[in-house]
Image (tube, helix red, strand yellow):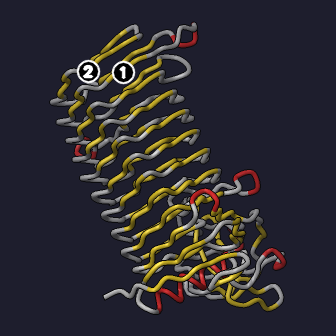
Amino acid sequence: MPANITVSVGQRKADFVGRTHMVLQGAVDYVARLGGGTVKIGRGTWEMGNSLFIREHVRIVGSGDNTVLRKCASTVTPLLDDIDWYGTSVRVQDPSIFSIGGALLLRGKSPHYEATRFSKHTVLAIDGDTMHIDRDPRDNFWTDTEPVAATLFPIITGDYINDVTIESLCIDGNREENEELNGNYGGGIFIQDCDRIVIRNVTTRDNNSDGMSWQVCDDVTVEDCRCINNTNLGLHAGSGSQRSQVRDCTMVGNGQGFFFCWGVRESVLERCTIEDTKTQGISIGHRDTDNLIRDNVVRRSGEHGLYFRTHPQTKRDAHRNVFERNVIEDSGTKGDCVAIEMLGAAEDVVLRDNTIRDTRRTAKSRNRIGLRIAEGIERLTLEGNTFEGVEQDVLDRR
């Protein structure tokens, strides 16, 4: 059975005292080694030079938005020599940007095919221009493809870790001083191959990435969280994630609001507010099936409030999803302003008791369409939906 130890972290008086990621990591690792328990983080701003790596059976709880984990400014330097997939040392042009215990991300074009590769590491030792890292990258970063090493990382991260709670703190991505990190590798919170993770009452803001991203994770719960002004996705339910439960969250000013990635199934998105996205409010697509989206409010999306992505293979579309009692308001800023855009060939989707409306009266909001249905959509159920302030309620191309 997990232990029930509780330790405190503070900047002046606590069990663990400090101001950086290292004191936070020390507390989390200590509790994990004793079998689990709670790490309480007090008020203040912690400067994050690397991720806080979550550990099994550890609850991390702060003092709300008064506990701030703030990412340091990112820097980048070219590699001086190849590192192969089995290597554990990296030679760099400017070693001064790295520190022992800090993050080192390898980024470069694959020498074998057309793709950019990423590999996240911690620096264990520094010897001149050589950084010794915690593990081999299992990828090739060769100088003829001009790879770089950077201080980019998720602020909280986990890999193959189960049964963790993160609550009542603020994650500040320091967006203006950081390069973008793809949401398949980073975010304010980034977890991969983790099950039964609870994230509650967390603010994640100003990340030059996603607010929160979970990849190939089952039974993730996100409650009462705020995702604000993140470059890419507010909340990213990543590929292969099953039974996510997302409730009572607010997403404002992100690139997109909530993103169902590939193969997200049997998940619930409910009672959330999504406002002022650059493109889509809610996006759903490749093999995202059997999900329930209800009682959400989506306002002022730059393109669409609800967007069904398309795939060349119809069997890979978003089948058997239910959308009910949602409010979608003032969608799109140019061209045809379509609140719900159904592309592809989704089957057996239900749209029930939703309110689709446009309150704007300027010339820019003309050609407003409530729902546009592509010709490949099959067995669509429309029940009790209300349309207000649009020129055309439903444009059905089937």
State the residue lying farthest toward the front: 13
Q: Give the amino acid type for the residue marked by disc 2 in the picture.
A: Asn
Residues packed near mark 2 inside 10 Å, few (<14), some (14 to 19) or many (20 plus):
some
Q: Residue at x 36, y 65 (%)?
A: 217
Of 183 and 66, nearer the camera is 66
Q: Give the amino acid type for the residue marked by disc 1 in the picture.
A: Ile
**Mark closest to the chain's N terminus, 2 or 1:** 1
Quick one: SS at disc 1?
A: strand
Of 241 and 8, nearer the camera is 8
Q: Is residue 29 left or right of residue 287?
A: right
Alpha carbon distance from label 2 to label 1:
8 Å
Q: Residue at x 20, y 41 (%)?
A: 320
Residues packed near mark 1 inside 10 Å, few (<14), some (14 to 19) or many (20 plus):
many
Quick one: SS at disc 2?
A: loop
Quarter residue 368 falls in: top left
Counting every numbered tag in the picture gives: 2
Q: Is residue 292 left or right of residue 48?
A: left
Numbered label attached to residue 285? none
Q: Residue at x 62, y 70 (%)?
A: 42
Q: Is residue 291 above or below residue 277?
A: below
Q: Is residue 310 above or below residue 219?
A: above
User: Which quarter of the rendering shows the N terminus?
Assistant: bottom left
Q: Circle 1 sits on which residue?
A: 356
Of 303 and 273, nearer the camera is 273
Q: Is residue 230 above or below residue 109?
A: above
Do labels 2 and 1 touch, CB within 8 Å?
Answer: yes
Residue 193: image location, x then y, percent: 39, 71
Q: Circle 2 sits on which residue?
A: 385
Residue 33: image location, x then y, percent: 47, 92
